[in-house]
Amino acid sequence: MSSSPTQSISLTRYLIEEQRAGRINADLRLLIEVVARACKTISIAVGKGALGGVLGDAGTPGVASMNIQGEAQKKLDVLSNEILLEANAWGGHLAGLASEEMDTSHPIPDVYPRGNYLLLFDPLDGSSNIDVNISVGTIFSVLRCPDGVTNAADEHFLQPGTQQVCAGYTTYGPSTMLVLTVGNGTHAFTLDREVGSFMMTTRGMSIPEETKEFAVNMSNQRFWEPPMQRYVGDLLSGKEGPRGKDFNMRWVASMVADVHRILTRGGIFSYPLDSKCAPKGGKLRLMYEANPMSFLVEQAGGAASTGRQRMMEVQPTGLHQRVPVFIGSKKEVEAAVRYHAEHD
Ligand code: AHG
Ligand code: MN
Ligand code: MN
Ligand code: MN
């Protein structure tokens, strides 16, 4: 599937076309529109930077506000979470929400109607980049709520990534872009700030199967498992080495920015197990980082793995479960998986 330029099709029109084709229903269409509208609000807050009083840590001076991840929350983490909660409270599409920034899943207030979907999100991804004006983003995933459940509990969210009906992210970079899949390809929309609409700018993002670009935090190298050491060592040995080509490296420390680059021009992104994060299962979170990104990447012809298992087949055991991540150009992910298989 090659990506193609497109005349100005708005997100709204694209979603109506998907509904008319029977691939989504009205509730899911409206849910996606609500999330996109909330991301526009987040984009405005991010864009104000220091002028909007949104930089820096949440909490009070000297008393950090910690999330369940054990991370000190940024003001934008908290604000983005509140924007998404408020936007999704009254729409009637959801039976519950889950977020990186909330300990447990969050019910829909009793005063509002409920629906059949579960929304999971990382409201602000790449928080360490907020105060240094580097791209950050929002990641979201939509699951169906099990039949007969109107008030979801944590266990109702614990579905493998293959059960997702929608996944997307918004990247707040030089332009604000929404990248979305409802299971019929991965498509990119750019925010037209004058009109206030997301306009389709790429129909059918397509990841080259091969790449010469990898994204990993090299400062963890000495903590990696042996297969990861060998895999990256071979990448770094260039065309004289077993991989036979010279690789370039990028690391933004915003998963959204790194994965967006990979969806746009190929590459492999990895946050593997290391002896520091291994006791927790990894660094990145399965339900609202790895799974939505995996759905988007697979729909663009790429691959996503824990290094030992297709990401979207992992059976979740916890809302904030962490996993090792290898995601991007299909043949490069397959190579990384081979190194693990040969070692195990
Ligand atoms: P978040 O800001 O939502 O907590 O996610 C940060 C993640 C991910 O976006 C990024 O790829 C990774 O953490 C960066 O980790 P390091 O700071 O260890 O490089
Ligand atoms: Mn965080
Ligand atoms: Mn994140
Ligand atoms: Mn986050």
Image: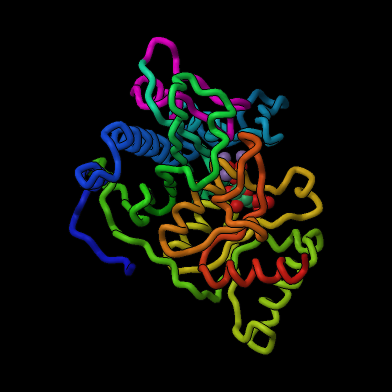
Side of 214 relative to 200 (left or right): right
Q: Is 206 or 124 nearer to us in this picture?
A: 206
Q: What colouring does the structure picture have?
A: rainbow
Ligand 4, image quadrant it occupies:
top right
Q: Is residue 344 above or below residue 23?
A: below
Side of 344 relative to 65 (left or right): right
Q: Is residue 244 above or below residue 73?
A: below
Q: Residue at x 64, y 56 (%)?
A: 306
Q: Is 165 or 16 nearer to us in this picture?
A: 165
Magenta part of the protein: which range? 84-112
> Can see residue 263?
yes
> Can see residue 127?
no
Q: Is 142 or 55 nearer to us in this picture?
A: 142
Residue 118 lies in quadrant: top left
Side of 179 relative to 268 (left or right): left
Q: Is residue 322 above or below residue 115?
A: below
**Position in image of residue 13 (x %, y %):** 20, 45
* 241 falls in the magenta region: no
**Position in image of residue 108 (x %, y %):** 45, 19
**Position in image of residue 239 (x %, y %):** 63, 87
Looking at the rendered image, the quarter that the C terminus falls into is bottom right
Residue sticking out furthest to the bottom: 240
**Position in image of residue 335 (x %, y %):** 62, 72
Q: Residue at x 81, y 63 (%)?
A: 222
Residue 242 lies in quadrant: bottom right
* 91 falls in the magenta region: yes
